[in-house]
Image (cartoon, helix red, strand yellow):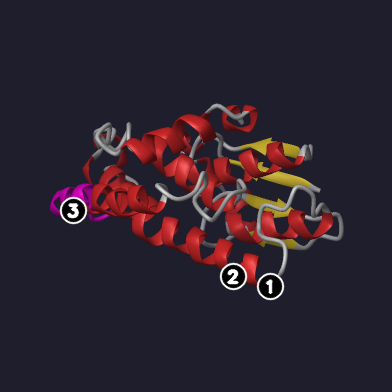
Amino acid sequence: MKLYDGGRAPNPRRVSVFLAEKGIEVEKVPVDMGQMGHKSAEVTKLNPLQRLPVLVLDDGTVLTESVAICRYFEELHPQPPLLGTDARDKAIVEMWNRRMEFNYLAPVAAAFRHTHPAMKEWEVPQLAEWGEINRPRAIAFLGLLDTELANREFIAGDRYTIADITGMIAFDFMKPARIDRPEHLKNVMRWYTTVSSRPSAKA
């Protein structure tokens, strides 16, 4: 199988960190997103949405969307469980991962895509006002998360999961999005220090 990888972009990185946590090695096809490689004919043929990552299985099946790819690998390699264990736990992990996607990663991405000069040709139309609106939305959600993290070590409970991967990557993405680190949110900062210190965070 081959993984068409976009490097440090948030969604490709989510899969890379997930694979590193699992100890899984997959052949990667590097795609330079800075040079619009994700819009190439090769990638477009695999994914008409022109987004990464893209996983091509040995039988030719094409999987896109980072969480779908992670779920595929979780089924093949259930340990360590990053998407939950029993029905209840899987639902909790899914709930928090979706919360991290919709309420945190999405606003950070909107701030980046709609205000960063390098994204002018990517986000058409680029609406600076929408980008600015999303900066405080991201921080507001972290305030909610700070309260939750007062009672547990990780986002979805007492075990590291994909929700922590999504959250860590969103946190790192705040820098290029020009959103200040929430140093006043002590539980969030404690959590981030923990998850960003894991070896997989370098993936």
Q: CA gap, disc 1 to disc 3?
A: 41 Å
Please tell me how crowded label 1 is: few (under 14), some (14-19), or many (20+) other residues with Cα within 10 Å: few
Res. 194 visible in picture: yes
Instruction: Tell me the SS state at disc 1.
Output: helix
Instruction: Tell me the SS state at disc 3.
Output: loop
- The residue to which callout 2 is attached is 91
Q: Position of residue 158 (x, y in %)?
A: 58, 49
Q: Is residue 90 above or below residue 12?
A: below
Which residue is pictured at 72% across the width and 68% down the height?
86
Q: Quadrant of residue 44?
A: bottom right
The answer to which of marks 1 and 3 sits earlier in the sequence is: 1
* Label ID, residue 87: 1
* Label ID, residue 127: 3
Foreground of the two, 17 or 85: 85
Res. 173 visible in picture: no
Which residue is pictured at 70% across the width and 45% down the height?
3
* Label ID, residue 143: none
Foreground of the two, 104 or 56: 104
Which residue range is magenta in the image?
124-136
Which residue lies most toward the front here? 151
Q: Quadrant of residue 103?
A: bottom left
